[in-house]
Image (cartoon, rainbow, N blue to C red):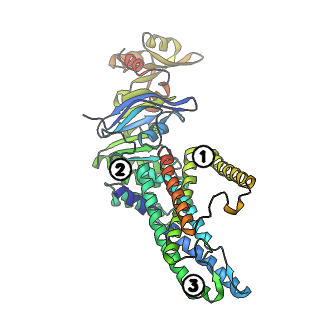
Amino acid sequence: MTPTISVSGLTRRYRGQRALDDVTFDIDGPSITGLLGRNGAGKTTLMRIIATQEFASAGSVRVLGSSPVENGAVLRRMVLVREDQTFPRLRVRHLLRAASWFYPNWSGGLAEGLVADFNLPLNRNVGGLSRGMRTALGIVIGLAARAEVTMFDEPYAGLDAVARQLFYDRMLADFTDHPRTMLVSTHLIDEAADLLERVLVIDQGRIVLDAAADDLRGAATTVSGTVDAVEEFAAGRAVWDRRSIGSQESVVVSGVLDDDDRARARQLRLSLTPLSLQQLVSQVPGRSNQDLKEDQSA
Amino acid sequence: MTAWINVGRYHLVDPIAYLVAPWAILAFVFLINLVITEAEGGPNPTKALAVIYLCFFGLGILSAGGSLPFGLALGASRRSYYTGTLLLAVALAAADGLGLALLQVAERGTHGWGLALHVFQVSYILAGPWYLTWLTSFVGLTLLFVYGMWYGIIYRRWNRFGLVAFIVGQVAVIRVWIVIVDRGHNWGGAGFSFTPSPMGLTAVLAALAVVLLIGGFALMRRVSV
């Protein structure tokens, strides 16, 4: 089966610095994939290159089986909504009307519903919109386009918590009705964690983790208690992080804990807290995908 | 073809900038000249017509500057965006050029609107029959639009530094040309071994437009947004 998005050996250099360094991954079929990483990790550059808004220094990108570069047949089946999207100075209704001409699967009904949900003023010039409203406009276009490959780059700038939840809810609802390949970059990882089926973690231009989100839930646990008890429990396990204050210690152990492990922890009066996806991702840089798999199987 | 049409429709989604503003500004400047001529008396050959050419220059900048990032975000390829934009520019230049030619006919017919006011007749370059006025206007408007696009494209590719280098480069070329002509004491022909006829000058402008058009496409191919 041809991957929906196939990235191979992708490198992007800017004046000697590598924004992307030999990035390789495939995304198959309808799914919501999270592209996670810190600011400046290379998320936006990667998405821009996939959408042909930027050029690679080396490597290749194929979308829906073909190179997307100057390929109208692929480009009209793909949409990228960026956090820093530049809009021409037009009214909101003009921008939505223009977008509807370019996307064959455009849903006017969905666009209308989202405009109402986000309270977007259709007759206001985009120059007069708040940052959050501009973000909401991008979300409306990105979802209503119903493109087979839909990419959102940090789609929450200026949005409050209620509006962000609205975005997550509407995205999931429309994905359920119209499954497609969605790639969402974010650093508000825990907010979006429940949506994600797969996680790509990028750090300093390199993919450092590529895993199913379900495999990562419970993949590491914070163990807290007295130093002696924690050390006894952690002995022989892969320890990612270790902190101690006085007689108390807290360590992050990798690998899924079974019933015996939990019973042992109770016996030692230890507290076990599974790492959230956000905490897990913050632990990942510096470890290779192989390291993580080995840790989990240990 | 559909992509080209969509790009054209995108530029015209709010028709004010492309369809209304050039004529509104020209009408405003025309009225001012009319009032001044009536007050001071004619004949009054003005340079008011230049505003519509400046508008086309500005529209060229707008099309390749402010409108380009969203155009590409909507899935237009660079090639289709450039071609669609140019086809729109050519169509507008043809229509607006015809409008200017008809206004020139009206100006002649009314002896300068009754005041010997010359807005749409420009000596030497726009002083012939209506069809030559239309042709020269069409070429001139297209040239200014494409020239404006160069500014937008260069800004998108190389930011402000590229834009400054582009302007400085043009100034340097013009300066060198002036020095060469000055040393050769050849100002009569402005450096040419002949003085072109109005039709010949239109042909030179058309050739320049074609060069800019081809060069603009080459520049556009590597634009990132």
Q: Which residue lies furthest to the front in this view?
A: B193
Mark 3 lies on residue: B108
- On the question of residue A88 being in view, the answer is no
In the drawing, what numbered circle is on residue B150?
A: none
Q: Nearer the viewer, residue B83 or A261?
A: B83
Q: Residues within 10 Å of mark 1 (few under 14, many from 20)?
A: few
- Quick one: SS at disc 2? loop
Q: How far apart are marks 2 and 3 (CA)?
A: 51 Å
Q: In this view, does A105 lie to the left or right of B9?
A: left
Quadrant in the picture for the C terminus of chain A: top left
Q: Is residue B1 left or right of residue A125?
A: left
- Quick one: SS at disc 1? helix
Which residue sits at x=53%, y=14%? Answer: A227
Kind of residue indicated by mark 3: Arg
Q: Residues within 10 Å of mark 3 (few under 14, many from 20)?
A: some
CB under 8 Å between discs 3 and 1: no
- Quick one: SS at disc 3? helix
In the drawing, what numbered circle is on residue B159?
A: 1
Q: Residue furthest left?
A: A1
Q: How far apart are marks 3 and 1 (CA)?
A: 46 Å
Mark 2 lies on residue: A76
Mark nearest the camera among 2 and 3 is 3
Q: Which of B166 and A210 is in front in this view?
A: B166
Tag 1 subunit: B
Residue A86, horizontal then vertical, whole percent: 52, 52
For marks 3 and 1, the one nearer the N-term is 3
Q: Which of A2 and B47 is in front in this view?
A: B47
Kind of residue indicated by mark 1: Asn
Which residue sits at x=47%, y=25%? Answer: A284
Compared to residue A285, the image places residue B173 above or below, namely below
Which quadrant holds residue A1? top left
Residue B158, horizontal then vertical, whole percent: 58, 44
